[in-house]
Image (cartoon, helix red, strand yellow):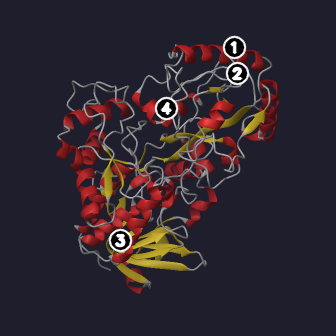
Amino acid sequence: MIDDKKHPTASRRNFIKAAGAGTAAAAFGAVTLSAKAASELKFDAEYDIVVCGGGGGGLPCALFSRWLGNRVAILEKAGSVGGTAAKAAFWYWVPNNEPMRRAGIADPKADYLRYVARLSRPEQYDPSLPKLGLSDWEYEMCEAIYDSASPAAELLASKGALPYRHEGSVPDYWAELPEDKAPRGRVLFPKDGLPSMSDGGRVAIRTLSTAARRDGIDIRTGYRVQKVLVDGKGAVIGVEAQTEEGTHFRARVKKAVVFATGGFTHDPELRKNFLHGAVYGGCAAPTNEGDFVRISSALDVQLRNMNYSWMAPISLDKAIAKDGSLSGIFTPTGDSMLYVNKYGKRVVNEKLAYNEVCATFSQWDGAKGEYPNLALISIWDQQAQDHCASDDYGSLIVPKGSNDRHVLRGNTLPELATAIRERLAKHKSAVGGMDLSDDFLRNLDTTIKRFNGFAKTGADADFHRGERIVEKLFNGPVSKKADQKNETMYPLSAKGPYYAALIVAGNLDTKGGPKTNSHGQVLDVSGTPIKGLYGVGNCVASASARAYWAGGGTLGPIIAFAYRAANAAHAETSTSI
């Protein structure tokens, strides 16, 4: 007999439904097989390891598993491999990497741990404590990144799957913090990527997928995994997927199933129920719909870190249009450029690292009962348009002929304000009826005059723009002018034309899901590993909490855990039915 495995408690059923699974949950979950049913069930294929998802976590994990001698398959939901990683710059942050060691750049483990703990749990951080204020789980997971990211990167490079070049000058995002004793040198990048380091994802997915096919990994695209198959002892023995043609495919696994299916960025209900503030979507692959949250919920897993994501500002217009070119605004290009809110006031350092800018959108004004910064308005002049346009890193200021559906124009500031009002009215239902305040233009005039004064002296007394290393890194293509004292700031012209774009909170992907141990094994509510079930990447819980430690702080740890999960899965004893 085959039975859908029941949730262990009514409260857990209600929790998942409230989170957005709804009727769709019926299509996802776990099926428990009796010994008789398992012996009679027809499988379409058999492997040692099945990896669900063929992106920046799934491809490395499949390769590591194959190089250990396993028969491996990748079941990818989309029509091609790559996932979110294919769109990424694909910097990967590798503490104490081999080039650092060769160059004599010290990156001791204790110092690395202080840096990541300080940023992940600032409210708990205590350097006098043995684990710095982190929980046992967080500390162990952070240790695992340090221990395994470099061996994983070296193995991928040595096998020709991910050759890299060392970007030794790239700083961490908080290079000035006293806890960061190795502020530069932790970033690796695909070897054949552009000098701008903007195309690494395309290069990495090409080399990783080529190596996977070369080494005999069975890659099946258009296969959406919907169920795990479990024996009577609770061990995962297979998966069931639906193909693009609507047929069902069952794969038997001898050792393990590894999920690397991405987060829940593109499920509006999960975003609304778990993430803080209004998040309008993101630049994750459109297939990142939280499948593993739903599948694993039937197995009594622990969910962790569901309230955080890898944040980045995004274009409101592109988000609403579900524009495939949508990218996080990693580089807020433009020196004669500023952000203002609906009141025409600056509220943030525009050059702050993207994850940190997003905290501004969710600031709540309790007296007015509103999010005054729900959507911010980037405003720039012709000088910035002429000299700071870029196609890279989600720049709002784009070259002529590029996709500029998000750009508003006005020959004067009043004309620009009219265009902004019209665009807000168009998106009224998405922004809670937000409109510019009656004193917007008066406040904007004051704001620009104040900003221009700061730009002339080179010192931003309000938000300290341009004072940190990372703010110069993400400044964009600006050639410093003879009279420019701060390369990130230049006075806005007193004459038009002027340009604007609406920006809101978005993400690269979410970073919450089932809790795993440091070997990638998914844990049940008692903390016991579920035999044969693993998770890697954004479909499982990250120990980074709110932090975005550095460029590549997503992919470096993902590669580390792909390596650890592959080794642990390889050591699993074969299941029998």
Q: Residue furthest front?
A: 482
As drawn, the label of residue 211 is 3
Q: Secondary structure at mark 4?
A: helix
As drawn, the label of residue 446 is 1
Q: How far apart, in angstroms, are the residues tagged by discs 3 and 4?
A: 36 Å
Q: How far apart, in angstroms, are the residues tagged by discs 3 and 2?
A: 52 Å
Q: How far apart, in angstroms, are the residues tagged by discs 1 and 4?
A: 26 Å
N-terminal-most mark, 1 or 2: 2
- From the image, tell me which residue sits under label 2: 344
User: Is 420 displayed left or right of 402 in the figure?
Assistant: right
Residue 15 higher or lower than 207, as above or below: above
Q: Does the residue at mark 1 contact the one at mark 4 (Cβ under 8 Å)? A: no
Q: Nearer the viewer, residue 307 or 192?
A: 192
As drawn, the label of residue 356 is 4
Indicate the quadrant where residue 133 lies.
top left
Which kind of residue does numbered mark 2 sit on? Gly
User: Is 454 displayed left or right of 8 in the figure?
Assistant: right
Q: Secondary structure at mark 3?
A: helix
Which residue occupies 28% across, 27% down?
A: 179
As drawn, the label of residue 333 is none
N-terminal-most mark, 1 or 4: 4
Q: Does the residue at mark 1 contact the one at mark 2 (Cβ under 8 Å)? A: yes
Q: Indicate which label's residue lies in the foreground, 1 or 2.
A: 1
User: Is 574 displayed left or right of 294 in the figure?
Assistant: left
Where residue 355 sits: x, y (%)? 49, 36
